[in-house]
Image (cartoon, rainbow, N blue to C red):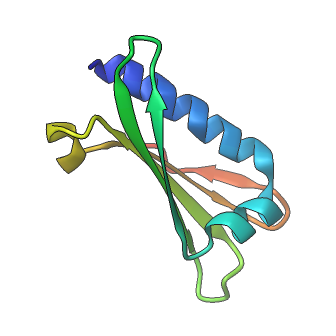
Amino acid sequence: MSDAEMKAMLTAESAKLRAVGYSELAERFAGKQERIELIAASGDSYHVEFEGFWDDDEQVDLRVVASIDDGGLRAFLPFTDAFTITPAGTITEHSTA
């Protein structure tokens, strides 16, 4: 299991989310979690979790957080990526991967 492989997969999954748009992200993630398992080219399996929550009291801007781990020790300190999207589609990055 490779940190570089996990980071690359997280970056790819996060890029897909950024391309979706506000309406679909709000419907899919606002106050919700989604988990998937990805198999890397190396054959290693990774757990990816997406979570969305309102970034303001007015429930307008949506923050989406994605994390990835290998199911082992990395589960205690997963790689993460986060961004906030406004209804106009403006994205603010909060990446930590």
Place of residue 59 in the rendered image (x, y in percent of width and height, measured from the top left): 66, 83
Place of residue 24 in the rendered image (x, y in percent of width and height, measured from the top left): 78, 61
Q: Is residue 47 left or right of residue 73?
A: right
Counting labels gives 0
In the picture as drawn, the residue positioned furthest to the bottom comes out as: 58
Tell me which residue sits at (14%, 39%) in the image. 73
The C terminus sits in image quarter: top left
Tell me which residue sits at (70%, 52%) in the image. 91
Q: Nearer the viewer, residue 58 or 69?
A: 69
Q: Is residue 15 left or right of residue 95?
A: right
Tell me which residue sits at (50%, 50%) in the image. 94
**Vertical relation: 85 (above or below) 73:** below
Query: Looking at the image, can residue 97 be seen?
Result: no
Place of residue 10 in the rendered image (x, y in percent of width and height, measured from the top left): 49, 34
Query: Looking at the image, can residue 91 be seen?
Result: yes
Tell me which residue sits at (47%, 33%) in the image. 38
Answer with the quarter of the image where residue 74 lies: top left
Q: Nearer the viewer, residue 8 or 41?
A: 41
Place of residue 72 in the rendered image (x, y in percent of width and height, measured from the top left): 17, 38
**Vertical relation: 35 (above or below) 7:** below
Q: Is residue 97 left or right of residue 16?
A: left
In the picture as drawn, the residue positioned furthest to the right comes out as: 88
**Vertical relation: 1 (above or below) 42:** below
In the picture as drawn, the residue positioned furthest to the left comes out as: 73
The N terminus sits in image quarter: top left
